[in-house]
Amino acid sequence: MTKAIEPVDSTVLDRLERSSTAAIADTKHEDVTAMATGIEPVSIDGAVAGPVRTVTLDPTALSAPVQTLDAAHEDELIVVDAGSTAEAVWGELLSTYAEEVGVRGLVTNGAVRDVGEVRDLGFPIFAGGVTPRGPSSNEEAAQNEQVTVGGALVAPGDVVVGDDTGVVVIERDVVEEVAAAAEAVAETEREVDRLIREGRSLEEAFEVAGL
């Protein structure tokens, strides 16, 4: 039996999607981690946020995470620890199914394929690479356990936010606190922008805004 993932209020997820990952990272909150640059946006239009359902694959015989996707609920985001980009762990068919059941996106340190088709679907994906080669196994090593992807520890139920800049991980217990802090960061940046347009120097704008 798969473990339940505690849902996150959709309004909080919407607030996080309206905040950039840069603003979230700039909160400097100890429970926020930015994934390494090797996890790149493959298919993204705007931003995506959701509570995480994790799966670990055997890097010597990668599989498509079908069982994990079948167990996923609406608004969740799948994080796949593949440990290898030798074979694709995700493609068009899984993206189509994920869209149908309301899964918000995929983050993996593995590879994906069918990139053009996935982009046409508009399904958000962040991955460690792309390859046409498909998976060679049917077995998932572990479901809903803590994983490390892009140098970040990710636990089931944590919230991941991704956009064109990259991916950040927020521990579940501080999601609302981080959302508010990111909004404050964004407001400060808007104030700097206003001051610059008034003709202030960059240094003065930073000082007045409190940066």
Image (spheres, grey):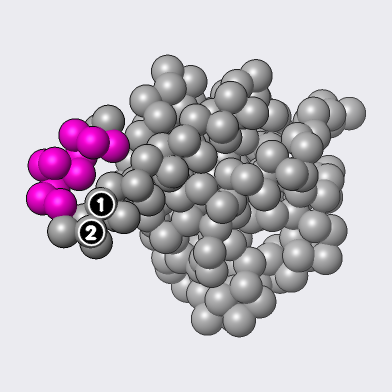
Q: Is residue 66 left or right of residue 175?
A: right
**Circle 1 residues within 10 Å: few <14, some 14–19, many ≥20:** some
Pick the residue in front: 136 or 13: 13
In the displayed structure, 183 sits above or below 152; it is below
Query: What is the quadrant of the C terminus in the image?
Result: top left
In the displayed structure, 177 sits above or below 74; it is above
Q: Is residue 194 left or right of residue 169?
A: left
The x and y percentages for residue 120 are 61, 81
Q: Amino acid at mark 2?
A: Glu
Instruction: Decide whether residue 202 is among the magenta residues.
Output: yes
In the displayed structure, 120 sits above or below 69; it is below
The x and y percentages for residue 101 are 84, 58
Q: Amino acid at mark 1?
A: Leu
Residue at 70% in and 63% down: 94
Range covered by the magenta-colored residues: 200-209
The x and y percentages for residue 82 are 51, 43
Mark 2 vs 1: CB contact within 8 A: yes
Q: Is residue 110 visible?
A: no
Instruction: Decide whether residue 103 is among the magenta residues.
Output: no
- Quarter assignment of residue 135: bottom right
Query: Label 1, on which residue?
Result: 195
Query: What is the quadrant of the N terminus in the image?
Result: top right
Query: Label 2, on which residue?
Result: 198
Q: Secondary structure at mark 1?
A: helix
Q: Main secondary structure of the magenta part?
A: helix
Q: Is residue 193 visible?
A: yes
Residue at 82% in and 50% down: 74
